[in-house]
Image (cartoon, coloured by chain):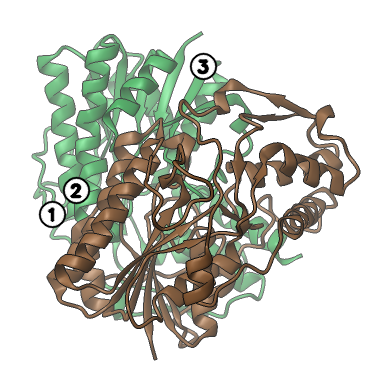
Chain colours: A green, B brown
C-alpha cells in the first residue's frame, strides 16, 4: 500500500486528491494548520479515513516530524495563501507560506526521506505578464502580483531540488480549476451560489465585475488526477494542466442562469468597482505535453462544470432553507 | 462612536467581545486569518452584508505573522481600543508546532505594539494573558504578584507577550494592559478543548452516536469560568484611569474528573462507563493546579463572575444536546449545527 502526505487537504484540491488517492487504496495523511474553528467541511465525508498531523508550513520541525510520522511515498504540496486579494493584504505571510513554505518542505524531505516523490502546485498566475498565447512549459515566467511571485519562487526552488539534489520533484502549472468545493470568494462559485440563491428567492441580483474577462477554467477533479499521474512517471518534470479553451464571465453567467431557466440579463449587475486591470494577453494553457506524456486530458466540459456547481449550490442552499 | 479592533475575533472570546462592544455602541473591526474554509461560524450571527446595511462589524484580512498587514490595518482603522485575542491558543498543540506558536502568540504581540508605535495611533491596548503563565504554580491561589513558571511552548510565548506589553507601557507610556485570564469556557469553546470535548461527547453518547470518550489527565485542576463574564472584564480593564494588569478568575477550582461527573451526572449517566485514557492527550509537561485570586479586579474593576461551575457545565451540555438533536432529527441544520449565513465580504486595506 502506498502512502501519501497532502498539505492543504482541507482545501478544494486537497479534498478531491484525498478522495482520488483513497480510491486507489493509498494510506492518506493530511497536514493540518491549527484552527480554532473546525474547517473540515470539504472532507467531512472521508475524514475518518484520513490520518491528520498537526503542522504548519511556517514551522520547520513540524514538517520534519510529519514526514517521520507518515513516511510517505508521495508528498503533494497544495497549501498556500490561494486568494489573490488576501495576498495584497498580507504579502509577507503569503510569501512565508506559498514561497518559503516550499523550501521548508523540500528541506524536510531532503533531510528526512529523500526518495519521497514531491508534487508542487504551481499556477498560471506565474504567466500573468507573458507575451505568448497559449502558454506552455517553455514560456518564460512573468509574475505580476504577490501570489504569482511567491508561486514563481516555489516553482523555481522545486526545479532546483530536482536538478541539484536529485529529488523526484514535479511541478504542475495549473490554470484556474473550479468545482462545488471551490471557496465562495472565487468568481465561478460566487456565480453558482448567487444563481442558486436567486432561484430560491433568497437574493434579487448578482453583482460582478467585468463580464468580458476571459479565463481558462477546468474541473478540479480532473486536475488532481494529473497531479497523481506526474508522480507515477519515471522521471520528474513540469507540466501545464489546462483546458486550452477560454470562456468569458458572460458565458459563465449565461450557462449558470440558463440551467435554472432564468435570463442572466435580468439579474446580473456589472459594477466597475470590481473591474481588475485587464491582462495584456490571454491566460490559456497548452496541455499537449501532459496529453502526450501523462495521457491526461480534461474530461468535464465548461458547461458541465458550471451546471455541476449550480446544482450543488441549489442543494446546499435548499437544505439551509428548510 | 468608539472604534475597537479585535484580533482573534473568530474565536470564542472574540465573538463574545464583539457582541458586547456592539451592544455598547462601538464600531468593531475584526482581523481574520485567510482560510479557504469557513472560519467565521462564531460571528456569523453578528454579520450583515455591508452592501445592504451600515453595519458596525467589519472584517479585514490580516495576520499576526505579517507586520505589514497590521500596520496598514491600524493606520486605516484608527482604533480607540485594540484587543489582542489572536493566538495559537491550544496548549497541547503548541508542543507540535512550537515555532509557529512563538511567532503568532509571542511575536505577534510585539508586531501589534510596534504597529501602534509606528503609526502613532492613540489607542488603548489589551493583551490576553493566560493563567498558563503560572504553570507549575509557585503559590496557591495565584494573583498579580505570583511569579511565572511557564510549562509549554504556548505559555512561554504568552510570557513574552505579557512582558513586552508591560514594557511598552513603561517605555513608551502606552495604555497597555494584561488580563491574566484563568480558563474560561462556553458553548462556543473550540471542540478540541477538554471541557467542550466532554460536553459534546456527552450529547453524542446520549444520542447513541459515540460510545467512548478518550481523554488525557483527569486530575488536572482548573479554575473554570464563563467566557461571556470574562470579556466584560477585558472591556473594564480599558475603561480605567490608569493601565494595569489584572487576574480574572472565579477563585474556585475543579478537576477534569469533577467536570466529567457534573456533565455525565446531569444526564444521569456514569462517566466511568465511557471514558478511557489515551496517553496521546497528555501534555509532555503538565500544569497541575490553577486557582486564581481576582480580588484586585473585584475591587478596582468591580468585576465578578456571574455563572457558577455547575451552571456552566449545564449550559454547555444543554447547548450540545440541542445541536446534536437537530442533526439527529434532521431539521435541515448542516453538520456544524448552524445555518449557513451570509458570507462575510471582506474589506481590503
Looking at the image, is B208 positioned above or below residue A310? above
Question: Whole-percent x and y of residue A285?
Answer: 25, 41
Specify whether A284 is left or right of B23.
left
Looking at the image, is B257 positioned above or below residue B22? above
| Residue that appears at 39% across and 41% down | B154
Callouts 2 and 3 in the same chain: yes
Which residue appears farthest toward the bottom when viewing the image? Answer: B1
Question: Whole-percent x and y of residue B247?
Answer: 47, 61
**Chain letter behind tag 2:** A
**Chain letter behind tag 3:** A
Quarter of the rendering occupied by the N terminus of chain B: bottom left
| Residue that appears at 45% across and 54% down | A183
| Residue that appears at 52% across and 66% down | B295
Specify whether A315 is left or right of A84.
right
Residue in the foreground of this view, choosing between B143 and A74 = B143
For label 1, the residue is A144
The disc at residue A26 is 3
* Mark 1 in CB contact with mark 2 (< 8 angstroms): yes
Q: Secondary structure at mark 3?
A: loop
Amino acid at each position: 500500500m502506498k502512502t501519501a502526505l497532502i498539505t492543504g487537504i482541507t482545501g478544494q484540491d486537497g479534498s478531491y486528491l484525498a478522495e482520488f488517492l483513497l480510491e486507489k487504496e493509498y494510506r492518506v495523511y493530511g497536514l493540518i494548520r491549527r484552527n480554532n474553528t473546525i474547517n473540515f467541511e470539504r472532507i467531512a465525508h472521508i475524514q475518518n479515513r484520513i490520518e491528520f498531523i498537526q503542522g504548519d508550513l511556517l514551522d520547520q520541525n513540524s514538517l520534519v516530524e510529519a514526514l517521520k510520522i507518515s513516511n510517505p511515498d508521495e508528498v503533494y504540496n497544495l497549501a498556500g495563501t490561494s486568494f489573490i486579494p488576501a495576498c495584497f493584504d498580507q504579502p509577507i505571510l503569503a510569501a512565508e507560506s506559498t514561497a518559503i513554505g516550499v523550501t521548508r518542505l523540500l528541506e524536510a524531505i531532503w533531510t528526512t526521506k529523500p526518495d519521497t516523490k514531491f508534487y508542487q502546485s504551481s499556477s498560471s498566475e506565474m504567466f500573468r505578464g507573458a507575451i505568448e498565447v497559449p502558454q506552455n512549459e517553455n514560456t518564460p515566467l512573468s509574475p505580476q502580483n504577490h501570489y504569482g511571485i511567491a508561486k514563481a519562487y516555489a516553482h523555481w526552488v522545486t526545479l532546483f531540488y530536482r536538478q541539484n539534489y536529485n529529488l523526484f520533484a514535479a511541478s504542475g502549472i495549473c490554470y484556474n480549476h473550479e468545482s462545488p468545493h471551490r471557496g465562495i470568494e472565487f468568481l465561478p462559485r460566487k456565480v453558482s451560489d448567487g444563481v442558486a440563491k436567486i432561484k430560491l428567492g433568497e437574493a434579487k441580483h448578482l453583482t460582478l465585475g467585468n463580464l468580458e474577462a476571459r479565463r481558462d477554467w477546468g474541473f478540479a477533479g480532473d486536475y488532481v488526477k494529473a497531479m497523481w499521474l506526474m508522480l507515477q512517471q519515471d522521471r520528474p518534470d513540469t507540466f501545464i494542466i489546462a483546458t486550452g479553451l477560454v470562456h468569458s464571465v458572460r458565458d459563465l453567467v449565461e450557462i449558470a442562469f440558463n440551467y435554472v431557466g432564468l435570463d442572466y440579463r435580468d439579474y446580473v449587475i456589472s459594477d466597475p468597482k470590481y473591474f481588475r486591470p485587464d491582462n495584456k494577453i490571454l491566460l490559456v494553457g497548452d496541455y499537449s505535453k501532459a496529453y502526450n506524456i501523462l495521457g491526461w486530458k480534461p474530461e468535464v466540459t465548461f458547461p458541465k462544470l458550471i451546471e455541476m456547481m449550480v446544482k450543488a449550490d441549489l442543494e446546499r442552499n435548499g437544505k439551509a432553507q428548510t | 462612536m468608539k472604534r475597537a479592533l479585535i484580533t482573534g475575533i473568530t474565536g470564542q472570546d472574540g465573538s463574545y467581545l464583539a457582541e458586547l462592544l456592539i451592544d455598547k455602541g462601538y464600531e468593531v473591526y475584526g482581523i481574520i486569518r485567510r482560510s479557504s474554509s469557513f472560519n467565521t461560524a462564531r460571528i456569523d450571527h453578528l454579520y450583515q452584508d455591508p452592501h445592504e446595511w451600515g453595519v458596525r462589524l467589519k472584517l479585514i484580512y490580516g495576520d499576526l505573522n505579517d507586520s505589514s498587514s497590521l500596520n496598514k490595518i491600524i493606520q486605516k482603522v484608527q482604533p480607540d481600543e485594540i484587543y489582542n485575542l489572536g493566538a495559537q491558543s491550544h496548549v497541547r498543540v503548541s508542543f507540535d508546532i512550537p515555532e509557529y506558536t512563538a511567532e503568532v502568540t509571542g511575536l505577534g504581540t510585539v508586531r501589534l505594539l510596534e504597529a501602534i508605535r509606528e503609526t502613532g495611533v492613540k489607542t488603548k491596548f489589551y493583551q490576553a494573558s493566560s493563567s498558563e503563565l503560572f504553570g507549575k504554580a509557585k503559590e496557591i491561589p495565584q494573583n498579580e504578584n505570583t511569579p511565572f513558571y511557564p510549562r509549554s511552548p504556548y505559555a512561554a510565548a504568552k510570557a513574552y507577550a505579557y512582558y513586552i506589553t508591560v514594557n511598552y507601557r513603561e517605555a513608551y507610556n502606552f495604555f497597555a494592559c494584561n488580563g491574566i485570564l484563568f480558563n474560561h469556557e462556553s458553548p462556543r469553546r473550540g471542540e478540541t478543548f477538554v471541557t467542550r470535548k466532554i460536553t459534546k461527547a456527552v450529547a453524542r453518547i446520549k444520542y447513541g452516536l459515540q460510545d467512548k470518550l478518550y481523554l488525557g489527565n483527569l486530575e488536572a485542576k482548573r479554575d473554570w469560568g464563563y467566557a461571556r463574564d470574562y470579556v466584560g472584564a477585558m472591556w473594564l480593564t480599558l475603561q480605567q484611569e490608569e493601565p494595569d494588569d489584572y487576574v480574572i478568575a472565579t477563585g474556585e477550582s475543579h478537576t477534569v474528573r469533577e467536570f466529567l461527573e457534573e456533565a455525565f451526572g446531569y444526564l444521569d449517566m456514569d462517566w466511568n462507563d465511557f471514558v478511557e485514557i489515551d496517553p496521546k492527550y497528555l501534555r509532555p509537561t503538565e500544569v497541575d493546579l490553577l486557582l486564581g485570586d481576582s480580588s484586585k479586579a473585584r475591587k478596582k474593576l468591580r468585576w465578578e463572575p456571574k455563572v457558577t461551575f455547575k451552571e456552566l457545565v449545564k449550559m454547555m451540555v444543554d447547548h450540545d444536546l440541542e445541536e446534536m438533536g437537530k442533526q439527529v432529527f434532521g431539521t435541515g441544520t448542516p453538520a456544524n449545527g448552524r445555518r449557513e449565513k451570509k458570507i462575510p465580504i471582506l474589506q481590503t486595506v
